Image (spheres, rainbow, N blue to C red):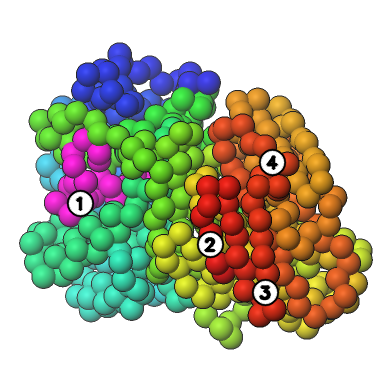
Amino acid sequence: MPAPYVQLPATDRVLSPRTGWTRAHWEAVADALLAGVAPYATPGFAQYRLPGRAGWSGVVCDGLEGYARTFLLAAFRIAGAGGDVDPRLVERYATGLAAGTDPASGEAWPRLTDCSQQMVEAASVAIGLHETRPWIWDRLDTRVQERVVDWLSGFVGHRTWDNNWRLFQVVSEQFLASVGAPYAQEDIDGGLDRIDDWYLGDGWYTDGDGRNFDYYNGWALHLYPLLWARIAGEEDGDRAKVHKERLTAFLRGYAHFFGGDGAPVHQGRSLAYRYAAVAPVWMGALSGATPYAPGLTRRLASGAVRHFTERGVPDERGLLPLGWYDTFLPSTQPYSGPASPYWASKGFLGLLLPPDHEVWTARELPLPVEEADRYTALPVPGWLLHGTRHDGIVRLVNHGSDHNPPEPGPASDDPHYAKLAYSTHTAPESAPHAWERTVDNHIALVDTDGRAGRRVRIHPLGTGDRRAASWYAARLPGDDTEYRIETTSLLHGPWEIRVHRVEAPPGVTVREGGHALADARQPAAHTGPHWATARRLDGLTSAVVGLYGWHETAAVARDFEANALGPHSAVPYVRSAALPGGRSVHVTLVVLSGDAVHPAELHEAVSVTVDDGSGVTVRFPDGTELRA
């Protein structure tokens, strides 16, 4: 259902044959979001206290978050229009600055302290002030300017978390430098130098030490260095050139993360930021660091925002709820407050490009998945992207990102990182009761009480053309013994073949699930010898076919309120007989398709041979052979 709160202009199918969207649509969505939060402002407009679950930093910090993150959107809207907006919008945020930095206002923002949430929000304030300088900063009373400087100065010489937060300090202190206020150059240089330690090549950073690959690579680690360059006037400097080269490298693969319906792959944390996924796409165009033709930039960005708008985002109140489409708290983090989703503002960075820029005037071009089936290997994060033209689905096969610190640090599993696969059309079962069972996109040892082992720390073994591999150390509940499970994924046509080499004690079973389907209504479930399927009313089908090493009986696990994409969900899975102990091989065909799926025929037509050395050869009906 289209977002009822947003009044969109008429579509233009000549300029934008894929989405119909123009710059006017972007302005309409931005205006609707800014209008939606206005009723929740405090009297002095320094805080926006939105309804919803409070974040762990408290209600005042949540109110600051509401101001800062929507100010970022307002800044792009104001600057992109050359100040030609409703003057009440400019006044609203200028008034909020005055009240937020006035200890006597009753709405004062918390002071910046080491590693405080206020540091995140201060960076948005600094960026917004830079971009709107002629309309807001330059017109502020001197006393207000001094108070703003005093508040932002809480960064100087202080400590942030050692991850993307280092960049909040960089942009904020650079703003201080730009207005002649005291700052520490060593903080700026130190932050920019530190992220170099996390750059692993091909456009990919890990967010802090470890294997932390997700959308923060684009909406933070690539974004802030080039925003810093804008503030510093160093857009052509040597450091900026390095970051432009890295962003260009990242974007070469990034277009493959988006499905034909515009949806980004559903993986990683902070997914409630939604539109922020297109921020690096706009930054590429803004900084001249993009491999995309202008028409592809707009197609990708417009498609993503349109995807959410067509599915009721923002909601009937004009707000961005904590979730993907509707409110769904299991897909959020405990630090997320009701205004956290407004980091989505980063997705409107393109409004800084003038209306006559070719990104707005060029004819839309198709996404990669709209042109042909695509296989994209991303060796640094350990991912394979797999897009199919006929249904527009993009699948991410995960053999590398687990969001854990390096060994020997403590490790845990998270449904948004631990799965074998993600996609543009599905989400993991992330509610606590479902995560306890962890059926979908996971191969697990299951004890006699039905308790499953976890895929906690992923050890990559390599990613290449249509194949990737990794292993993890499985532990059964109450048993510290580690059992190695090694998985190789092979892609062929619309299918993923998973070859598992499993170590296990006697008596346990092995279970593997496919993609979780979720919808407003219960997906249909079907099972047969060695196979199971779940199917939505729109035809989207998830299937698993046990090709080797599985018991004849397969099943579908149903759940309720477990998935961000809908209240009813279903996961097809296969299971082995009780194992004698030692090593075994299990081969599964995993399907996620918009086409009709015939699992019984696939089970007969796809053959598997396992040799004495546990080498596996898979033969497909078209004569193709793949070996793991």
Amino acid type, residue under disc 1 in the picture: Thr
How much space separates mark 2 and mark 3, taking CA atoms?
Answer: 14 Å
x, y percent for residue 100 = 36, 48
How much space separates mark 4 and mark 2, taking CA atoms?
Answer: 19 Å
Mark 2 and mark 1 in contact? Answer it, CB < 8 Å: no
Q: Residues within 10 Å of mark 3 (few under 14, many from 20)?
A: few
Question: Depth-wise, is mark 2 or mark 1 nearer the camera?
Answer: 2
Q: Where is mark 2, residue-wise?
A: 626
Q: Where is mark 1, residue-wise?
A: 290
Q: Quadrant of residue 324?
A: top right
Name the residue rendered at 44%, 45% in the picture: 387
Amino acid type, residue under disc 3 in the picture: Asp
Q: Quadrant of the C terminus?
A: bottom right
Q: Is residue 204 left or right of residue 289?
A: right
x, y percent for residue 258 = 41, 43
How much space separates mark 4 and mark 3, taking CA atoms?
Answer: 24 Å
Depth order, front residue of 319/396: 396
Report the span colored magenta: 275-297
